Amino acid sequence: MARILVVDDAQFMRMRISRLLMAEGHQILEADDGSNAIAVYKSSRPDIVLMDVTMPKMDGLSALRHIREYDPQAKVVMLTALGLESVVLEAVKAGAKDFIVKPFELPRVLSTINKLML
């Protein structure tokens, strides 16, 4: 199973995603903003990052760029309630491997994780 970093400023969302993924056997790390996500990524090197786009201090797109600069092979999936095409394009250009719109369904998240673990 994968070691997954879940990044979201909303604690309830981190808990929800973490519980669902732990039930599937994944190991979970958490961060509450982009700057903490970078620090956790550098210290733990997770297999996959699930990261919210909109967060205080440092947003997900900025954190994505920093993580990909540090590790060009990083597998980052962006999560957001904003299904805006411009945000999707910006995330993909910055190196996001996929983009999931909230509210998400567990099968969609698991499918993305399984695809990235191949």
Image (cartoon, rainbow, N blue to C red):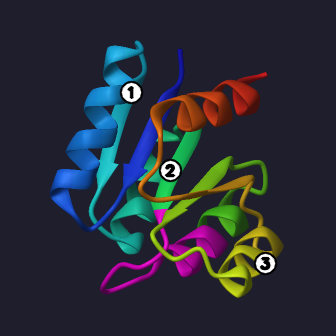
Q: Is residue 2 left or right of residue 10?
A: right
Q: In this orientation, does residue 31 appear?
A: yes
Secondary structure beneath dot 1 equals helix
Q: Is residue 65 left or right of residue 7?
A: right
In the rendered image, residue 53 lying in the magenta stretch gets the answer: yes
Amino acid on which the number 3 mark rests in the picture? Leu
Return the x and y of residue 46 as percentages of the image width and height.
Answer: 52, 38
Residue hosting label 3: 89
Secondary structure beneath dot 2 equals strand
Please tell me which residue is depicted at 72% across the width and 81% down the height of the picture.
Answer: 85
Amino acid on which the number 2 mark rests in the picture? Leu
Span highlighted in magenta in the image: 52-66
Q: Nearer the viewer, residue 45 or 100?
A: 100
Q: Is residue 63 left or right of residue 20?
A: right
Label annotation for residue 48: none
Amino acid on which the number 1 mark rests in the picture? Leu
Going from N to C along the chain, the mark reached first, 3 or 2, is 2
Return the x and y of residue 23 as percentages of the image width and height.
Answer: 32, 16
Return the x and y of residue 33 as percentages of the image width and height.
Answer: 33, 70
Circles 3 and 2, Cβ within 8 Å, touching? The answer is no
Secondary structure beneath dot 3 equals helix
Please tell me which residue is depicted at 61% across the width and 63% down the height of the picture.
Answer: 67
Residue hosting label 1: 21
Residue hosting label 2: 50
Q: State how far apart marks 3 and 2 are (Cα).
A: 17 Å
Q: State how far apart marks 1 and 2 are (Cα).
A: 11 Å
Q: State how far apart marks 3 and 1 are (Cα).
A: 27 Å
Residue 101: name its quadrant. bottom right
